[in-house]
Image (cartoon, grey):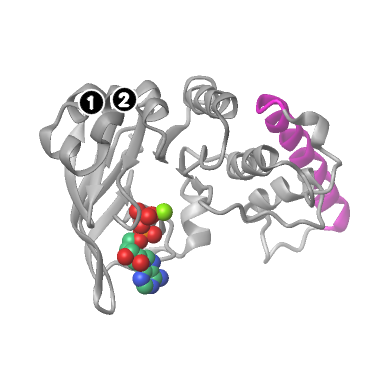
């Protein structure tokens, strides 16, 4: 089973303890949400999982792989892709070329195969890229340049690039941030379909409580780098510490 097991992680940046003894596990095929106020350590935890940050203590296992022994590109090969809180698209490339960047780890730099083979590979990647754009409902944007595209398209392009990596687990950092109600509804549907139709495990950071509560199997609340609560949405929603620290009136959402 490709479960993600995070054990006793401590991540400190000089004087700032961003994560303090954080443990949680995400089971294969789960939609697991991470919530918490700004600065509570959510993005740092993603950075620890995908190898951008090196925690001082703890372990992170994905199936049999010890992620803290791997570099970011090796972690993608283990089957973990991510999206970023701030969109990371390249404006002067087309939407399709932007998403095909997510397939770069399949190119073997040592390979001596002839050029025609890489062209064949490019064609295969394009077919897959178009299928993913179709799945996300933006296939018409394929040849459009990224520059000037609406924010919703930029966010979906981020998700598409992560999916092109053929992950077993996708980490999504605030996929609905900056979206209107209709777009947020569409994102919730897409997250559910990523799990239900593509069979990908989802770990998502999100502020929109109605989205989190409607799609998640389990929710973890981080508060100042510590796990404040973890459980099913209804358990977390009614947890007194959570209501006090974070949810407030929006617990009714
Ligand atoms: P969240 O995503 O929950 O808003 P972050 O994980 O981005 O929070 O940040 C958690 C804490 O760690 C914050 O105090 C932030 O300033 C600090 N932090 C995150 N990354 C770095 C870094 N590279 N260098 C120094 N401090 C950092
Ligand atoms: Mg963040």
Label 1, residues with CA under 10 Å away: few <14, some 14-19, many ≥20: some
- How far apart marks 2 and 1 lie (CA) works out to 6 Å
Which segment is the magenta one? Answer: 114-137
Q: Secondary structure at mark 1?
A: loop
In reply to whether residue 20 is colored magenta, the answer given is no
Horizontal and vertical percent position of residue 46: 39, 53
Horizontal and vertical percent position of residue 215: 40, 23
Q: Is residue 49 among what the camera can see? A: no
Q: Which residue in the structure is indicated by mark 2?
A: 217
Give the residue displayed 47% in from the left and 26% down from the top.
195
Q: Would residue 210 be found to the left or right of residue 232 on screen?
A: right
Above or below, comparing residue 207 to residue 225 in the picture: above
Ligand 2: quadrant of the figure? bottom left
Label 2, residues with CA under 10 Å away: few <14, some 14-19, many ≥20: some
Contact (Cβ within 8 Å) of mark 2 with mark 1: yes
Our reading of the magenta stretch's main secondary structure is helix
Horizontal and vertical percent position of residue 69: 35, 65
Q: Secondary structure at mark 2?
A: loop
């Amino acid at each position: 089973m490709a479960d993600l097991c995070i054990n006793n992680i401590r991540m400190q940046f000089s004087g700032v303890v961003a994560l303090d003894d954080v443990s949680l596990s995400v089971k294969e095929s789960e939609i697991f949400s991470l919530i918490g106020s700004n600065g509570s350590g959510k993005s740092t935890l993603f950075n620890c999982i995908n190898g951008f940050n090196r925690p001082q203590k703890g372990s992170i296992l994905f199936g049999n792989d010890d992620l803290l022994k791997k570099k970011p590109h090796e972690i993608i090969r283990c089957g973990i892709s991510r999206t970023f809180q701030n969109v990371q698209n390249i404006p002067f490339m087309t939407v399709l070329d932007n998403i095909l960047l997510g397939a770069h780890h399949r190119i073997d730099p040592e390979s001596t195969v002839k050029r025609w083979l890489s062209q064949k590979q490019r064609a295969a990647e394009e077919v897959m890229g178009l299928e993913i754009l179709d799945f996300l409902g933006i296939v018409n944007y394929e040849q459009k340049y990224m520059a000037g595209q609406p924010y919703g398209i930029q966010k979906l392009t981020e998700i598409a690039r992560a999916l092109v990596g053929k992950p077993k687990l996708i980490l999504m950092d605030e996929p609905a941030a900056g979206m209107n109600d209709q777009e947020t509804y569409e994102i919730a549907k897409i997250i559910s379909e990523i799990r239900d139709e593509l069979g990908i495990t989802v770990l998502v950071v999100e502020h929109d409580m109605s989205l989190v509560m409607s799609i998640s199997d389990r929710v973890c609340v981080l508060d100042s780098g510590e796990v404040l609560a973890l459980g099913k949405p209804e358990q977390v929603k009614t947890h007194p510490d959570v209501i006090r620290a974070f949810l407030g009136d929006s617990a009714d959402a």
